[in-house]
Amino acid sequence: MPPVINWVERKFQMEQVLKQREQVLKEKATDLWDDARSAIQDCCNSFRRRYDEGLEDKLENGLRIRIIRSFMVDHPLTTGTLKRRILAAFNETVPCIEVTVDDEIPIQFKIDADTSRAFITNEGREITADEFSEMALKRALCTPPEPSRAKGPATPEL
């Protein structure tokens, strides 16, 4: 029978695991953002090659990537070109990746870690960088915006 560990030892062990997890998160979150950013840029390149040569993506200061997709629409409120704006930004403080589409509420993909590695999560479930890029971009790249959503926080200030 294994020795019984008292609550003080369990408390100490838990604190050590939490310290190790926090250290991994601190060391690896930026690398994970680089993986996610790379997945976004790869998808943008593929989307440009397969569907829309006019798709724009621009890396800003290493912590944000802005994507603009133009759609031709024939809608009762407007006919012409509407732009969908997507902003994916790394928040080192939380840490997480926030994705804003037009004027919608940002979606937050938290970055978490165990004692050996960091990973992106969606609703508490671990996801790959490719799954992240699909969840972050698919609807925005493939669905035209409503005419009233043609501008928003992802729109750069001029």
Image (cartoon, helix red, strand yellow):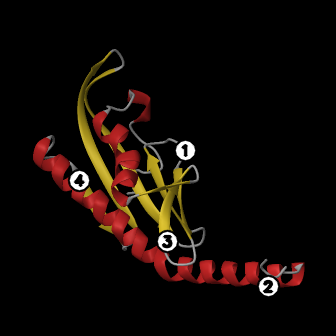
Instruction: Of the two numbered discs 1 and 4 on the same chain, state the one appearing first in sequence.
Output: 4
Task: Provide the residue designation for mark 2.
Answer: 12
Q: Amino acid at mark 2?
A: Phe
Label 3: how many residues lie within 10 Å, few (<14), some (14-19) or many (20+)? Answer: many
Tell me which residue sits at (59%, 72%) in the image: 93
What amino acid is labelled 1 in the image? Ile
N-term mark: 1 or 2 = 2
Residue 33: where, in percent of width, then height? 41, 69
- Near mark 4 (Cα within 10 A), the count class, few <14, some 14-19 or many ≥20, is many
Instruction: Report the side of 121 relative to 75 (left or right).
Output: right
Residue 107 percent location from the top left of the image: 52, 49
**Image depth: mark 3 or mark 1 in front:** 3
| Amino acid under disc 4 | Cys
* Numbered badge on residue 44: 4
Q: Secondary structure at mark 1?
A: loop
Disc 1 designates what residue? 105
- Callout 3: SS: strand
| Residue type pointed to by label 3 | Ala
Q: Earlier in the sequence, mark 3 or mark 1?
A: 1
Identify the mark nearer the N-term, 3 or 4. 4
30 lies left or right of 93: left
Residue situated furthest front in the rendering: 1
- 73 up-or-down from 129: above or below: above
Q: Quadrant of residue 34?
A: bottom left
Where residue 18 sits in the image (x, y, percent)?
Answer: 68, 78
* Residue 39: % across, % down: 30, 60
Secondary structure at badge 2 equals helix
> Which of label 1 and label 2 is nearer to you?
2
Label of residue 118 in the image: 3
Q: Does 101 sit above or below residue 33?
A: above
